[in-house]
Amino acid sequence: MNFRNLCIIAHVDHGKTTLVDHLLRQAGSFRAHEAVTDRAMDSMDLERERGITILAKNTAIQLGDTKVNIVDTPGHADFSGEVERILSMVDSALLLVDAAEGPLPQTRFVLEKALARNFRPIVVVNKVDRPECRDGIRVKEVVNAIFDLFVDLGAKEDQADFPIVYACARQGWCTNTLEEAQKLLESPEGGSLRPLFDLILKQVPPPAVSQDPSFKMQASNLSYSDYVGELAIGRVYSGSVKKNDRIIRMSYSEKSGPTKETFTVTRLYTYEGLKQIEVETLVAGDIGILSGCKNFEIGDTLTSDDKAEAFERIRVERPTVGIYFSVNTSPFSGREGKPLLSRTLFERLSRETKKNVALKMEPTDSPDQFRIFGRGELQFAILIEQMRREGFEFMVGKPTVLWRGEGESLEEPIEKAHIDLPGEFAREVTSLFQERKGILQSYETLESIGRVRLIFEIPTRGLLGIRSRFLTITKGEGLMSSEFAGYAPSKGFIFQRTTGAMVADRTGPVTEYALKNLEDRGVFFVQVGMEVYEGMIVGECNKDTDLNLNVCREKKLTNMRATHGTALEHLHGIRTLSLEDCLEWMEADEWLEITPVTIRLRKKILAGNMRSVRKEDRLADGAS
């Protein structure tokens, strides 16, 4: 059988998963009576809820006698580690670019990696049906921007001469010319993805297969089955393997160095549409799955030849942000979930870092705490939410950046932030980023869509906790994304939060009477009737100092009848914080308590008489 292996890469929300839906439908991967949901590749609950791809996933379509393996990859920069390791499985890529937004940071990041592997990507300019693109002017500007990006990244001449299709993935059609696309916008009934199918067969090279008869495969992804256990997913580079064959797993660790382990292959699978089909043999050129070993790790070489050389380990960009995970030590521990012992927490985090090479873990001075290193707040939020839905209770600290060097040579990670927003908000957003030590690098007016694009160079510390304020300023119309730009000398102190916290000074239920009399002190996070404990954060204080207060105070009963005005008093409003909001809001001296039911902010030191309320003291305590 002929094979073609490619991935789909793009910035978040440019239409990758929707395009894969229609590729599967039009290639005949589904039966006529089969019910298929939209965004079928987004199989995780979190992916469907958030509308983004989090994990890279495999599928396959049949075009004549050619099997095309397709990998749908994440588009958010926090999950770029998924993209980096998947590129080792494929020979080319479909580069999707929004016809209105143009190339954005993740587009640049993944394209740079693809070009370094000598891929010749097929460019798909998607969403040509957007109102601002119908006259074709903006689409031509985007094509020019894509070409400039190829040149800027040092593309070779044949790579810069990339084939283009203009598509509307939502309606399931594409064309080779912009003129045909504009005709299909008027009458889309006859459109299909046939031009893209033809380009894939023509432009994507068949996988290079070694003449070595021995089996050799690299594990680029891991999965798990309740029936057969650990699964290794990867591309077969040479030879073939059958069920019950004895093969060798070649691995490497920093502690023990190279290791070898022999095991028996118990199951073999390959992809057919969205399904994993059990097969008797996996052959060179295909992407498949095998089981039989409990110790698979990403980057392992699986071979039948004991003398074969192991593949180079899959390496990704180094993490720039860290976060502490801790056993739950709050007074309410165990009420709403399974409190994790330190051993169980270590095992759960180890399992996560094993299958996600973009995450690293290190122990701390405390046996109950572990530090996880990754790419950004969203990556941590997804891991926290997954563990929460598994029924666990634990705590996390404030995300912090990873410094390099010491003393006068101390350096911090720098990001290049790309901002796309209506021009009326540009002044306030510029002021916000400059407060966070951001330096404006570029100001571009996109007249065809009535927006402006700003590019800032800003410390990663400055981006932590900025999302909520950015969305508030732009009234939800702004788009912000970033890419790692390297390390630079420390930019100095940056205020992450200018307000203090309102902290409960005792345990008990929250009363409306208490909140009503304290409303002028700030904004509350807790509802009436909610149980609180001493040291739990119940709101945001108007001033920059913390405020310990009694939110459980009850109204004393008297024989005096309440006045009409008193009876009609209501609370002005209570702010509800999401998981990401809490990670943005919290300071270094605070924990975020996670349970399957509730998310609570609390102070690391619960007793009010043991901690300072002054901001300088609090930050110093948290840093230590």
Image (spheres, rainbow, N blue to C red):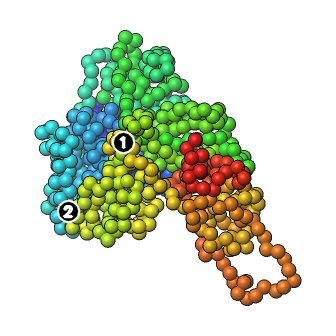
Between 575 and 516, the one nearer to me in the picture: 516
**Element carrying mark 2:** helix
Which image quadrant is residue 211 in?
A: top left
- Is residue 404 among what the camera can see? no
Outermost residue to the top:
307
Q: CA distance from mark 2 to mark 1?
A: 39 Å
Check contact, mark 2 vs mark 1: CB within 8 A. Answer: no
Point 66% across, 78% down: residue: 570
Q: Position of residue 573 (x, y in %)?
A: 60, 72
Q: Which mark is residue 138?
A: 2
Residue 429: mark in rendering: none
The type of residue carrying mark 1 is Pro
Residue 339 seen from this side:
yes
Can you say whether 229 is above or below 446 in the image?
A: above
From the viewer's side, name the closer residue of 282 and 293.
293
x and y percentages locating residue 112 in the rendered image: 26, 40
Name the quadrant containing residue 501: bottom right
Q: Residue at x 24, y 35 (%)?
A: 116
Q: Is residue 618 above or below residue 304?
A: below
Q: Residues within 10 Å of mark 2 (few under 14, many from 20)?
A: many
Q: Nearer the viewer, residue 461 or 296?
A: 461
* Amino acid type of the residue tagged 2 in the rendering: Arg
- Would you say 397 lies left or right of 246 here? right
**Coordinates of residue 404 in the picture (x, y in percent):** 41, 36
Tell us which disc is closer to us: 2 or 1.
Answer: 1
Assign the C terminus to one quadrant of the image: top right
Q: Earlier in the sequence, mark 2 or mark 1?
A: 2
Residue for point 44% across, 66% down:
472
Q: Could you say which disc has been placed on residue 489 in the image? A: 1
Q: Quadrant of residue 499?
A: bottom right
